[in-house]
Amino acid sequence: MPVQRSASASVPANVNDIERALTCVTYLAGRARQHERLMAMAGLTLDRAAVAILRHIAESEPMRPGVLAVRLSVEASHVTRQLRQLEQGGHVVRIADPDDRRAQRVQITDLGLATVDRIREVNRRGLQMALADWSGEDLEQLAALFRRLVHDFVAHAEDPLPGPAAV
């Protein structure tokens, strides 16, 4: 007899559906095979962690490696290792921290920006292929809902989660 999986009684069915869809999209976008395909299409050899770090640096002001680690919720040693790879490849440089001469910040280079642009372009083409049959109206609605979703996630990122529902 198949195991019956029931959704939480306190969570509406559509929220369960959204959670499942987001989990699936996250899995599909983040799997190693997809990353290798993306890198091949972009003509790059960076690993997933380096790409995540490079994209984050591209979207911010120069920052200390420790701050970057905190923002990405990873160990500082992990960021240091990836930054070394990115620095050796010419994607980032270390610059003096204007607030503390003993410290350094990481700044993206023109090559790093071009690399991020290539990655984004390949991602956009893949997304465009997946959404090719969607109407312009559907695409605009999806974009608006995603903007709202991101805004609300950010707004509630630090809110405590409710405890488990009584059974």
Image (spheres, grey):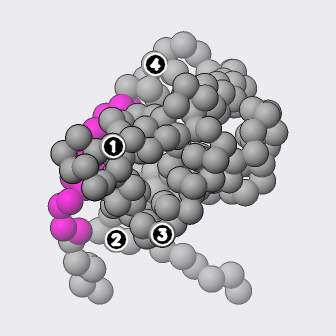
Which one is in front in this view, the residue at disc 4 or the one at disc 3?
A: 3
Residue type at numbered disc 2:
Ala
Residue tagged 3: 77
- Estimate the spatial distance between the alpha carbons at disc 4 and disc 3, rounded to whole Å: 41 Å
Indicate the position of residue 87 as horizontal and vertical percent values.
57, 46
Depth order, front residue of 90/56:
90
- Mark 4 or mark 3: whose residue is earlier in sequence: 3
Residue type at numbered disc 1:
Ala
Image quadrant in which the C terminus is located = bottom left
Residue tagged 4: 140
3 and 1 marks in contact (CB < 8 Å): no
- Mark 4 or mark 2: whose residue is earlier in sequence: 2
Q: Which mark is residue 12?
A: none
Q: Is mark 3 on a helix, strand or loop?
A: helix
Depth order, front residue of 111/93:
93
Label 1 Cα neighbours within 10 Å, binned few <14 / some 14-19 / many ≥20: some
Q: Is residue 54 above or below residue 131?
A: below
Q: Residue at x 36, y 46 (%)?
A: 105
Label 2 Cα neighbours within 10 Å, binned few <14 / some 14-19 / many ≥20: few
- Mark 3 or mark 2: whose residue is earlier in sequence: 2
Residue tagged 2: 9
- Mark 1 or mark 2: whose residue is earlier in sequence: 2
- Estimate the spatial distance between the alpha carbons at disc 3 and disc 2, rounded to whole Å: 42 Å
Indicate the position of residue 40 as horizontal and vertical percent values.
81, 39
Q: Which residue is drawn at 66% across and 27% down?
A: 118
Which stretch did the figure color magenta? 145-161
4 and 2 marks in contact (CB < 8 Å): no
Residue tagged 1: 96
Q: Which residue is drawn at 52% across and 21% down?
A: 139
